[in-house]
Image: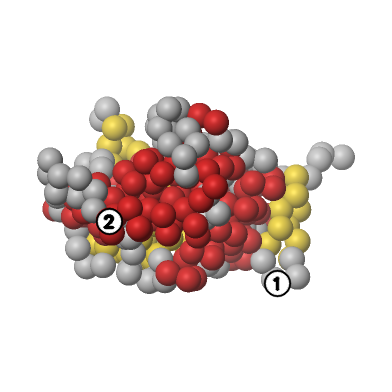
């Protein structure tokens, strides 16, 4: 499912945060939004989902999410915030089942199908053995998989993740990114993420969008965006950019001599 933004602008407390953002995300692709702190990355996701007021045109699969009821939007896009609320005492299964809320009638209960979908998602994410475990007893990597499980239970064609690797060690970061990529390919999902780690973004995303001061400073294939000059200009950092075995860029900090 495609995503298209045209002239998207957002103001917070009278201050412009996003200015004239244009973005095209092809169906089944992975686009990573990168940029320095305060560039407007999270705001972009919220505005794209219709969760934050903004000017301009937004279309997800040809529909404007701002005009949809929450239940309709939840069937179109699954979204995980940077710091999701995970009730410590809730089990992994019940938390995953929350992803079925848009399919459950008001004042109704989950159906056998809802429970089957939740169980299938947990199996795919290798969480079945944790189904009855409270969320508060999971490791960081396990909690992140539980967050993904809830999102996938929505069975939405678009997956939007705000900093999915935050606070994870390098091993768990790689596991989460591999998992998202496998799910994208297996289910034909369209994926949009924000991510701080530029090398991770360059290794996994099909396209990068560099936000700086609320505007799109660059977009394109990772090798076109992650250049030494771009990083110096927009992140005020000196890096060495090398090419990995698959042609994707790898960044390393460069100490002054």
Dot 1: few (<14), some (14–19), or many (≥20) neighbours within 10 Å? few
Image position of 169 (left or right of 165): right
Residue 248 lies in quadrant: bottom right
Image position of 226 (left or right of 157): right
Which residue is at 15% across, 53% downward?
68
Residue position marked by numbered label 1 in the rendering: 246
Q: Tell me where residue 128 appears, x and y as whole percent.
A: 51, 51
Give me the C-alpha separation between circle 2 and circle 1: 44 Å
Q: Tell me where residue 139 appears, x and y as whole percent.
A: 60, 36
Q: Is residue 53 visible?
A: yes
Badge 2 marks a residue whose secondary structure is: helix
> Which numbered disc covers residue 141?
none
Which residue is at 20% across, 45% downward?
109
Q: Tell me where residue 110 appears, x and y as whole percent.
A: 24, 48
Where, quadrant-wise, is the N terminus in this rendering? bottom left
Image position of 224 (left or right of 61): right
**Is 4 located above or below residue 104 in the figure?**
below
Badge 1 marks a residue whose secondary structure is: loop
Question: Are the residues flagged by discs 2 and 1 in contact, CB closer than 8 Å?
Answer: no
Q: Tell me where residue 235 appears, x and y as whole percent.
A: 60, 43
Residue 227 lies in quadrant: bottom right
Image position of 68 (left or right of 138): left
- Disc on the earlier residue, 2 or 1: 2
Q: Is residue 217 visible?
A: no
Nearer-the-camera pick, 130 or 152: 130
Which residue is at 35% across, 58% downward?
117
Residue position marked by numbered label 2 in the rendering: 112
Where, quadrant-wise, is the C terminus in this rendering? top right
Which residue is at 42% across, 59% downward?
120
**Is 185 located above or below residue 226 in the figure?**
below
Nearer-the-camera pick, 1 or 130: 130
């Amino acid at each position: 499912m495609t995503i298209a933004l045209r002239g998207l602008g957002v103001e917070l407390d009278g201050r412009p945060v996003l200015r004239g953002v244009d973005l095209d995300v092809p169906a089944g692709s992975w686009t990573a939004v990168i940029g320095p702190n305060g560039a407007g990355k999270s705001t972009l996701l919220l505005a794209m989902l219709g969760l934050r007021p903004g000017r301009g045109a937004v279309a997800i699969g040809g529909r404007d999410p701002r005009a949809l009821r929450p239940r309709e939007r939840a069937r179109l896009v699954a979204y995980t915030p940077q710091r999701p609320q995970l009730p410590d005492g809730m089990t992994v299964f019940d938390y995953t089942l929350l992803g079925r809320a848009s399919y459950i009638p008001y004042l109704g209960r989950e159906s056998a199908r809802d429970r089957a979908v939740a169980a299938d998602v947990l199996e795919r994410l290798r969480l079945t053995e944790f189904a009855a475990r409270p969320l508060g007893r999971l490791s960081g990597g396990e909690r992140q998989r539980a967050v993904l499980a809830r999102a996938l239970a929505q069975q939405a064609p678009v997956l939007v993740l705000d900093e999915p690797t935050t606070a994870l060690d390098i091993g768990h970061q790689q596991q989460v990114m591999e998992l998202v990529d496998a799910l994208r390919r297996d289910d034909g999902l369209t994926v949009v993420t924000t991510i701080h780690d530029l090398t991770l973004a360059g290794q996994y995303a099909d396209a990068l969008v560099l936000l700086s001061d609320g505007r799109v400073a660059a977009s394109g294939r990772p090798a076109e965006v992650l250049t030494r000059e771009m990083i110096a200009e927009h992140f005020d950092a000196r890096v060495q950019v090398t090419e990995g075995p698959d042609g994707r860029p790898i960044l390393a900090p460069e100490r002054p001599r």
